[in-house]
Image: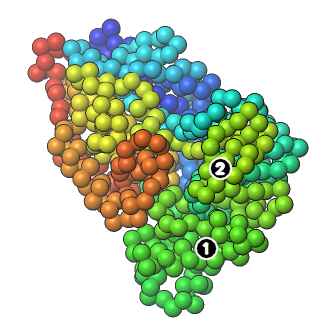
Amino acid sequence: MTGNVKDSSIDFDAVIIGAGFSGLYMLHILREAGFTSRVFEAGENVGGVWYWNRYPGLRCDSESIYFNYTFSEKLYKGWTWSSRYPEQPEILSYLNYVADTLDLRKDITFNTWVESAHYDEENNKWVIKTKEGECVTARLFITGVGCLSAANIPTIKGIESYDGEIYHTSRWPHKQIDFKGKRVGVIGTGSSGIQVIPIIAQESKHLTVFQRTPQYTLPANNHLLDPEYLQNIMDNFENFRNEVRHKTNGGFITKPLNRSALEDTPEQRERIYENYWNKGGPHFLSGSYNDLSTNPEANETAAEFVKNKILEIVKDHKIAEKLIPTFPIGAKRIVIDTGYYETYNRVNVSLIDTKKEQIIEITPKGVSTTEREYEIDVLVLATGYDAMTGPLLKIDIRGKSDISLKEKWDGGANLKTYLGLANSGFPNMFTITGPQSPSVLGTVPIFIEQHVEWIAECINFLRENEIVEIEATKEAEEVWSKHAHEVASKFFYAEHDSWYTGANIEGKPKGILVYRGGFQLYRKKCDEVVNNGYEGFQLTYRKNLSNNNSLIH
């Protein structure tokens, strides 16, 4: 049985948006199953967010041995990572290696922005149009746009009048920027700011950091990987793959201690925290005590340890105080860094607390605050992303009755999905790592593999049973979204403003954008849906349609 559609007016079985981790694997698995597919990618090459994000210091906060595909042993063994936490150029090289090895580029259209995707109810097909003027049709519409691909460009008064160089971390130029001898300003101290600031500080004449909210950041303690360690993983690949695919967060083998932080004495806690601080990475929070994300008193012991580290590292007490967060550790995404706090010991670095010294406007010469004007030669906007829903809502996606996804979600105020994979009113559409899936709460490529394989299995089911439409029911959406809210309410992040809840975007309604129940529970639920005959989905069979259209042949 081939994947070619019967109806000659249909161009493809599936159209996929994005040639990052999601789009590449989705294309490969559908092509292997015999389905015709086309990927549209805005960039000039593969990589997705790792193509666009290339600012200095950019490094993944998942360990490299997990941050790759595991579906193919041959593919896994054909690549060797150099260090514990991979840098952007190496990740981009890896994705190019995948595209070359699997010969994927022939089915990818680069330099193409998808402008709209509208569902044609009468003919059970998606009509996809690009900004470049191309129009194609497909039975299936699959988004792999990434959770952090829509830049948050701040609307600061006068920004258009600035005469110097200006860059956003999410759209960094494909060339090296020379900061030598220049006065640089960085607005934002989230993950991208924390990574880029130490690099710019080393190169620039003077760096002024404009911080709105201080973050908890942990040392990466990055190091080159031991060849013997890598070889052991290769030799035991099957066990390694099974383990990471069934972990709560899709990697990070370290399990938390089976006790509360409050069960230990202060001296014992200090030793535990010091051990995990020295291990580096996110293990400090995920690998130490088991109640740091849910118990306020336990959390405070960990937060206090990090606050004391800041006071210990940063020599100027007044600067250190500005860097100390006031929210629970883990309420916002934990950042890992290389020399971030140490950077504020440099004589060429200034830290401005914009809650006390507010930014009024950008002037032709720099940044004007309530206290003074800072002359800046290069302005770096490290203001993050319109996460999760943002990348999807930038496309005019319309389902049944011409209702847009933005209208359905009410801009996010009424966000409801089914498993983060599908939406009622939008038949034959799947969202890889969509809102209300685990997505960013772990090792993303592992989560992507689970989503892609679930979608591919579903599409095979549709073909084998001559099903024209599959659509999530409103009832299933209600149940899943209620469950997502109930799970999230147990954790600190649901109570505090962050991009996890959409609060970093002015005017964006706050909501539960990420499923907090863990990867194991999520995978189990997805499997149950399949085992129960795609429970929660409405299936329309070809034999019941007057137009006799087949989804895929």
Residue 382 picture quarter: top right
Q: Which residue is mark 2?
A: 370
Where's the C terminus, which quadrant? top left
- Residue 303 vs 209, above or below: the answer is below
Q: Secondary structure at mark 1?
A: helix
Q: Secondary structure at mark 2?
A: loop
Mark with earlier residue (1, 2): 1
Q: Which mark is residue 514?
A: none
Where's the N terminus, which quadrant? top left
Residue at x 37% of width, y 48% of height = 510
Tell which of 329 and 88 is nearer to you.
329
Residue at x 46% of width, y 62% of height = 331
Mark 2: few/some/many CA within 10 Å (<14, 14-19, 20+): few
On the image, the x and y values in percent for residue 31 come to 44, 27
Residue at x 23% of width, y 30% of height = 425
On the image, the x and y values in percent for residue 544 come to 11, 21
Q: Which mark is residue 307?
A: 1
Counting labels gives 2
Tell which of 77 and 207 is nearer to you.
207
- Which is more foreground, mark 1 or mark 2? 2
